[in-house]
């Protein structure tokens, strides 16, 4: 079992798109997947066909065990794990209620480990747990880094990509040095929204490859209209447009993801 945090503090790089579609691609291969929405915007759940604001219970309730009468147990996360339309894929949705969690968590002892504590009892049920992180490096993201075995870093092929990556790597280094999660590893970097007809996009990918070598996935996600459309339909790219470039790219990413781990493709 591997817990993977999909993270980049820069917004608009395709974190949710990557979490949802990589999860779906792995589930289609027969792996048991849990996708966790750690972003108060709730886009992961919406992308998978849920109406997060209409759900009675979400990650917020399990994370802070509220109400206590409902969530005071050793396995609070089980009550907010929902089946999706895709076999083998379950989801933990969130909504704006989670936006208050960082303030509420601040006074809790061991606040960096709250997510890890609720994931641990259910982790054996899944081959992979993918965490969609918010576009910030606050306490929610710290919880993701504390819970994860590795991080998958999507980066947009634009001028400031390396700066954002450098800032994130500094935070990951602190997480390890301070003993919050000394075993945290870099799972890899994935270029997104790429248009290889543009010199800048090719140059950015080349620069990241030069700096990080084999940690950069050979697969990159091309800019694709179908990928942009699928969330509004509450569908993965495979449900929305199975023959699109987006579907092809995420299938390739899942293959490379598994091959890097020595697992069956």
Image: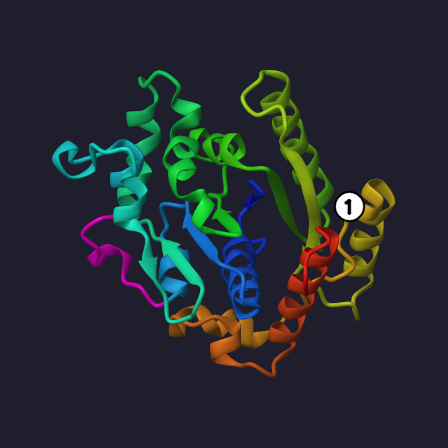
The residue depicted at 38 percent of the width and 29 percent of the height is 114
Q: Quadrant of residue 67?
A: top left
Q: In this view, does 70 lie to the left or right of 109?
A: left
Seen from the viewer's position, the closer of residues 52 and 64 is 64
**Residue at the outermost right position:** 210
When the figure is inspected, residue 142 is found, relative to residue 46, above or below; the finding is above
Instruction: Between residue 128 and residue 180, name the one nearer to us.
Output: 128
Verify whether residue 165 appears in magenta: no
- Residue at 34% over, 52% down: 93
Magenta stretch holds residue 52: yes
Please state the extent of the stretch shown in magenta in the rendering. 49-57
Q: Looking at this rendering, what residue extends furthest in the left direction?
A: 69
Name the secondary structure under disc 1.
helix
Residue at mark 1: 215
Is residue 58 at all visible to an observer of this figure?
no
Residue 85, image quadrant:
bottom left
Answer with left or right where residue 171 lies relative to residue 139: right
């Amino acid at each position: 079992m591997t817990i993977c945090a999909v993270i980049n503090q820069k917004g608009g790089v395709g974190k949710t798109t990557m979490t949802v579609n990589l999860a779906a691609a792995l589930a289609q291969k027969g792996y048991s997947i849990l996708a966790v929405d750690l972003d108060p915007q709730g886009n992961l759940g919406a992308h998978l066909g849920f109406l997060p604001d209409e759900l009675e219970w979400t990650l917020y309730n399990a994370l802070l065990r509220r109400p206590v009468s409902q969530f005071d147990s050793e396995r609070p996360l089980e009550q907010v794990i929902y089946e999706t339309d895709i076999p083998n894929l379950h989801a933990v949705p969130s909504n704006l209620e989670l936006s208050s969690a960082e303030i509420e968590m601040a006074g809790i002892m061991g606040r960096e480990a709250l997510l890890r504590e609720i994931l641990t009892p259910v982790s054996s049920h899944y081959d992979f747990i993918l965490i969609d992180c918010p576009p910030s490096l606050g306490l929610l993201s710290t919880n993701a880094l504390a819970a994860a075995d590795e991080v998958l870093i999507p980066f947009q092929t634009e001028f400031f990509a390396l700066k954002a990556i450098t800032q994130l790597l500094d935070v990951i280094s602190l997480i390890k040095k301070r003993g919050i999660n000394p075993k945290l590893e870099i799972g890899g970097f994935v270029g997104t929204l790429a248009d290889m007809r543009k010199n800048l996009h090719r140059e950015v990918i080349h620069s990241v490859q030069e700096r990080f070598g084999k940690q950069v996935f050979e697969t990159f996600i091309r800019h694709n209209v179908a990928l942009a459309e699928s969330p509004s339909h509450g569908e993965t790219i495979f449900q929305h447009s199975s023959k699109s470039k987006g579907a092809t790219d995420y299938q390739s990413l899942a293959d490379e993801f598994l091959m890097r781990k020595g697992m069956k493709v």
